[in-house]
Image (cartoon, rainbow, N blue to C red):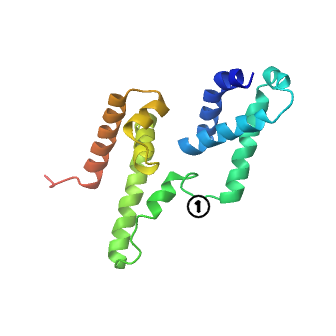
């Protein structure tokens, strides 16, 4: 019965959590935790009749996670990862330039197509392999490579526009 619930609702739960600004890895963890909580219930029949219960459990787990860890953790906010890339031991001018480049990168990521942004974040921030990313997003490995190439090309053009004409 739990397997049936998982098959029917795990993807929808994952999408719901992504819309709530969870990272893909956090959303996956919360979906798994939701079903672990369900496994402890004695009567799953009521959950089959009211799948909204699943979303409430996932939502509550997300709130608990944010309360426990706040917004400083990378798995809550991939942008926080970029904040750590500024070398605080460098000169103030260099720090300012680094900060501007990172802000520009964050802005670029926000403007990218969602699939391209997801591929970039999964590979570069979450540390997944191409194969893991493909499996996770349910796309081919060649699609992952194309999205990553597109992301890197856009970032490269924006951060290093080359000689001015």
For residue 55, above or below residue 158: above
Image coordinates of residue 17 in percent, x first then y, are 63, 38
151 vs 161: above or below: above
Left or right side of 162 for 147: right
Residue sitting nearer the eye, 109 or 10: 10
Q: How many marks?
A: 1
Disc 1 crowd rating (10 Å Cα; few below 14, some 14-19, many 20+) is: few
Image coords of residue 64 (percent x, y): 73, 51
Front residue of this view, candidates 10 and 158 = 10
Could you tell me which residue is drawn at 72 percent across and 45 percent down? 61
Asked whether, in this view, residue 149 is left or right of residue 139, the answer is left
Q: Quadrant of residue 44?
A: top right
Q: Is residue 100 above or below residue 157?
A: below
- Residue 22 appears in the figure: no
The quadrant in which residue 72 appears is bottom right
Q: Nearer the viewer, residue 110 or 149?
A: 149
Quick check: 54 left or right of 79? right
Q: Is residue 133 visible?
A: yes
The secondary element bearing badge 1 is classed as: loop
Which residue corresponds to mark 1? 72
Where is residue 122 shown, x and y percent of the image? 45, 43
Residue at (65% x, 38% y) in the render: 32
Residue 28 in picture, x, y percent from top left: 59, 39
Residue occupying image coordinates x 34% and y 68%: 97
Q: Residue 40, relative to residue 99: is it above or below?
A: above
Residue visible at 14% across and 55% down? 163
Q: Nearer the viewer, residue 104 or 59?
A: 59
Q: Which quadrant does the N terminus fall into? A: top right
């Amino acid at each position: 019965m739990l397997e049936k619930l998982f098959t029917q609702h795990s993807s929808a739960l994952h999408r719901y959590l992504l819309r709530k600004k969870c990272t893909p890895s956090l959303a996956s963890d919360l979906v798994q935790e939701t079903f672990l909580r369900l496994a402890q219930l004695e009567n799953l029949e009521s959950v089959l009749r009211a799948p909204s219960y699943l979303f409430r459990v996932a939502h509550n787990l997300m709130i608990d996670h944010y309360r426990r860890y706040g917004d400083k953790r990378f798995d809550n906010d991939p942008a926080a990862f970029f904040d750590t890339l500024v070398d605080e031991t460098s000169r103030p001018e260099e720090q300012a330039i680094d900060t501007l480049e990172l802000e520009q990168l964050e802005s670029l990521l926000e403007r990218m197509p969602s699939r391209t942004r997801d591929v970039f974040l999964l590979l570069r921030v979450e540390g997944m392999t191409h194969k893991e990313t493909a499996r996770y997003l349910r796309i081919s490995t060649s699609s992952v490579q194309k999205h990553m190439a597109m992301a890197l090309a856009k970032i490269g053009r924006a951060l290093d526009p080359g000689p001015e004409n």
